[in-house]
Amino acid sequence: MNRPVLSSLGRNIQKLRLAKGLSLSQLAQNAGLAKSNLSRIEQGNGNPTFETIWRLAIQLEVPFGDLVASEEPLFGENGVQVRLIGQGDDNPRVDVYWMSCAPNTVKQSEPHLAGTTETLTLISGRLLAGENDDRRDLEIGKAHTFAADTPHCYQTYETWATLMMVITYPKQDVSV
């Protein structure tokens, strides 16, 4: 894990541990860790495995995501915020974003490269999204894929909407 992720993980664990009234020794013992290892993790050092993080989440009685949640700022404008999560370097190229939309937001998006698609998975809230002439109400946990090489739109209702957006670009001809 990189340094910012480790620092964020450590702060999250310490905050949750203190909120539960647990000492460093208590949490370490409950999770089957050495106190010195837990101390290093809370300080943003060490290299915890996924299994270690899962054990800590179980002992703190929180979802795994609460421990690994990043404090990095989102990029945004006009009620829409996005964070790049990852980029593939395969062919076709795939980018993954975390997206959050403020209540009562309408975001028009220009067409992307020919052949590009978007797949949206709603995490929370309500969202109407898709090609301008075929927008759909998304269901939490369900994926909706549409052509992103035409004008498309995201529209929220009275609450925030949070979603995962996967953009798949067209396969490139690599023959020369």
Image (spheres, rainbow, N blue to C red):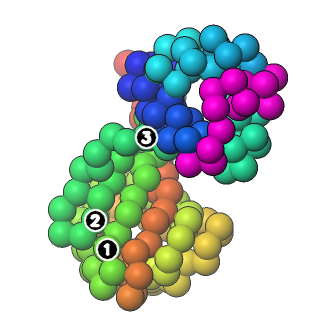
Q: Nearer the viewer, residue 13 or 118?
A: 13
Residue designated by label 1? 102
| Disc marking residue 80 | 2
Q: Position of residue 143 (x, y in %)?
A: 61, 65
Q: Secondary structure at mark 1?
A: loop
Residue 167 visible: no
Question: Is the C terminus in the top left, top right, bottom left or bottom right quadrant?
Answer: top left
Quarter of image, res 52: top right
Q: Nearer the viewer, residue 81 or 106?
A: 81
Distance CA(mark 3)–CA(mark 1): 20 Å
Residue at the location (33% across, 53% down)? Answer: 82
Disc 1 crowd, CA 10 A, few/some/many (<14, 14-19, 20+): some
Give the main secondary structure of the magenta stretch.
Answer: helix
Q: Position of residue 97 (x, y in %)?
A: 42, 49
74 vs 156, left or right, is left
Q: Amino acid at mark 1?
A: Ala
| Disc marking residue 70 | 3
Q: Position of residue 6 (x, y in %)?
A: 48, 24
